[in-house]
Image (cartoon, coloured by chain):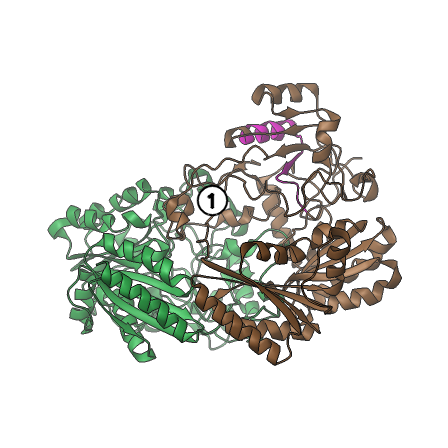
Chain colours: A green, B brown
Amino acid sequence: MAAAVVWRRGAAWLRSCRANRELPGVPRARGCAGSREVVPTCERYAVRRLPFARLADGDVAFFERLMPGRVITGEEEVKPFNVDWLKSVRGCSQLVLKPQTTAEVSQILRYCHERNLAVNPQGGNTGLVGGSVPVFDEIILSTALMNQIISFDKVLADGSALDCLTSLRKDNTGYDLKQLFIGSEGTLGVITAVSILCPQRPKAVNVAFLGCQSFAKVLETFTTCRAMLGEILSAYEFMDEKCMELVETHLKLSSPVADSPFYVLIETSGSNSTHDEEKLHNFLEQAMASGLVTDGTVATDEKKIKVLWSLRERITEALTHEGYVYKYDISLPVGKLYDLVTDMRARLGQSAKNVVGYGHLGDGNLHLNITAESYSHSLLEAIEPFVYEWTARCSGSISAEHGLGFKKRHFIHYSKPHEAVLLMQQFKAMLDPKGILNPYKTLPSAPDRSTC
Amino acid sequence: MAAAVVWRRGAAWLRSCRANRELPGVPRARGCAGSREVVPTCERYAVRRLPFARLADGDVAFFERLMPGRVITGEEEVKPFNVDWLKSVRGCSQLVLKPQTTAEVSQILRYCHERNLAVNPQGGNTGLVGGSVPVFDEIILSTALMNQIISFDKVLADGSALDCLTSLRKDNTGYDLKQLFIGSEGTLGVITAVSILCPQRPKAVNVAFLGCQSFAKVLETFTTCRAMLGEILSAYEFMDEKCMELVETHLKLSSPVADSPFYVLIETSGSNSTHDEEKLHNFLEQAMASGLVTDGTVATDEKKIKVLWSLRERITEALTHEGYVYKYDISLPVGKLYDLVTDMRARLGQSAKNVVGYGHLGDGNLHLNITAESYSHSLLEAIEPFVYEWTARCSGSISAEHGLGFKKRHFIHYSKPHEAVLLMQQFKAMLDPKGILNPYKTLPSAPDRSTC
């Protein structure tokens, strides 16, 4: 098994384009923690190498015959593939492969399965939980060259129904296998092609950037704008004043809104600019009159919209300038969303440099970030498992978007019942019986079968 | 194994409410094919009973102790559970169980697993592919009494983010097991509770019912209204003139639009009635001026909206008055959607009473229905596999919404590759090793292991 997964053959694929895209505002080459060497994962964390085969000269020779010129072996050349862009984890792989076709991926996996060689599938290496780089010497299977647009369907472009089997809106034949692979973080198979529904480009986009005096007002503003903006509301993001300080300090951005404990970014997308502006105007009038919002600015032209979005989107980048970042990506009932930040701030006191909260309020998704000059095990122990216990008490999810990767796999029980995890382990064993695909990731270790 | 599946415990569930709802306009008790006795499935189709245990008195006694008063055994009482509402398939179960809790479902399945008794999970028995009734003597596990609203979350009600773990919008911890069970038609587990996101009730709803002179114009009207109605377009349905004839003849409904080869129903849902009416008005003006639409009517009040919707929604009911209905539910590229109806009509000629097409154009979903006075094997052979081959050539799906059930499981290969079907069979074997859950459904038979 451990097969290459292709949703469907011969149709409208946009290959790996998302996975290979860089994070907004975060060029991969940029050093986040200066030029300091990253501590190898196997030294920082208690993890033991599983008994996979070691790479031999014959293996490299095989891959060089299979894909000449797309096999990377030099230590310096392999280095950037071994470290995540947060510079928080580091593997010691000696080999990067860059297949271009599904057939090549299949051949690589078949060979590695036979030889019992572990494989680390890697897209854009933008992961935030240590899932995208090797832990030990896993072979890195990079999808960097699988970036061709196989076809682009103009029906798609105008948003109407799709013209390829692969891109059907409805298909109810048998079990939904595709969904099992999505989000499995390369532990069940390698996704070699994707089909994406591109929504129609909206004719009118507006962005409002507002200041609120409390988180309660952030919530009430959300309820009001849900009701008044309705179907044209396309984003409702919030950030606290600490976040604003960081983007101002490290990135020299400037806030268009005066000092507020909280900031909100509201985006509308619609088909009629007159209607949309009228709706937005009515909402803002109401929000100001009722004191929900104390200050604000609105943008309708593309350039100013981009400037406003960068205040929110570049927080992640600003955080990396602080030193080491402990990142948490939590789903919670919206009403309790910010309590976690307040509680964590009180708990950590002076031992953390900053504790900040921002995120996608409409999705109930909080990005809690804690910074320190450098990694400290005692600070980690003050944060975890406290953050997971807090989340589980509110029936939240310990990973809303980021996945579990290497860093969070042992905490899956805070969000999933024991029976579910067992079932996942059975699926893993069925699809990848030797466990060669992205080992040490996503699921907790099965009972120890390793030799050191 | 063969466990009761609960997405998550202790949270915002709306139990089985959808599954237990009757189809619009189709009361379950209503005889569709008059009072004629339905031919038993095992006589009409070449299918052999698998070697499950036979129901014994001790089994019934066990269930009566487990759920006193909710065990149905009388032949007349069990009868409606053995026949689908289309009156096209019939099983010969002797036992219906009506559990009320997840714990009861668990106990039933554990017992049946130990005793090797086959089970047919049944919701509202509204299935269209013979999946919801037994083929032989499977025990019917009815969810009819699992209809309590466990909790209703007012956050939900206003459409804002959800306040329970079970109803989180985002959760990316481990594999998405839930999705594997959805659409598995009771062959992997029994879903005992569901959590539903209720969208905000729109402040303004409008419906336009229009006549088009060709299918090409139906398509062009769709493109135009996508662009001009944008975010408020909530439905785009079409039906051909044959459908209109059937609802007029059998249900005495009357069309508000003069003779047209095709009819289109457009619904808008939005937050501002003035804006919505203006958008709809502009679109209609454009559609009439450019000759896309020849005649039409618009409804804004709830009663008239309901009348217009009934023309489209009651086609299924009207069809059942014709005799026997061969039902196909196909996903296709929209441009080719109606060609299948035309081709089928030409192919069948006088051997069919009617060949009609209608469906959800926005989803690329065609409901192709063929009627005859009564079931005929030779007519079936004229339709199948022709309809599936035609669909596969266009990379369509042979079941967009209905599932595969009993009638279509052997045609899965027209929509799914061999490797995918094998993987599904492995999942089935893992979760339900004795194959007791809804046997003879969804997946093609594994190599024959039955005794007659």
Query: Between A46 and A74, which is closer to the camera in this rendering?
Result: A46
Tell me if I can see residue A129 in this picture.
Answer: no
User: Where residue B353 sits: x, y (%)?
Assistant: 84, 57
Q: Is residue B129 above or below residue B143?
A: below
- In the picture, measured across the screen, residue B345 lies left or right of residue B161, that is right
Q: Which residues are magenta?
A: B105-127
User: Where residue B75 sits: x, y (%)?
Assistant: 75, 26
Q: Which chain does the numbered disc 1 sit on?
A: B
Which quarter of the image is occupied by the C terminus of chain B? top right
- In the picture, measured across the screen, residue B18 lies left or right of residue B357, that is left
Characterize the local packing of mark 1: few (<14), some (14-19) or many (20 or more) Cα atoms within 10 angstroms.
Answer: many
Query: Between B310 and A251, which is closer to the camera in this rendering?
Result: B310
Q: Residue furthest left?
A: A350
Q: Is residue A393 above or below residue B270?
A: above
Looking at the picture, which amino acid does disc 1 mark?
A: Ser
Query: Between B232 and A88, which is closer to the camera in this rendering?
Result: B232
Image quarter of residue A102: bottom right
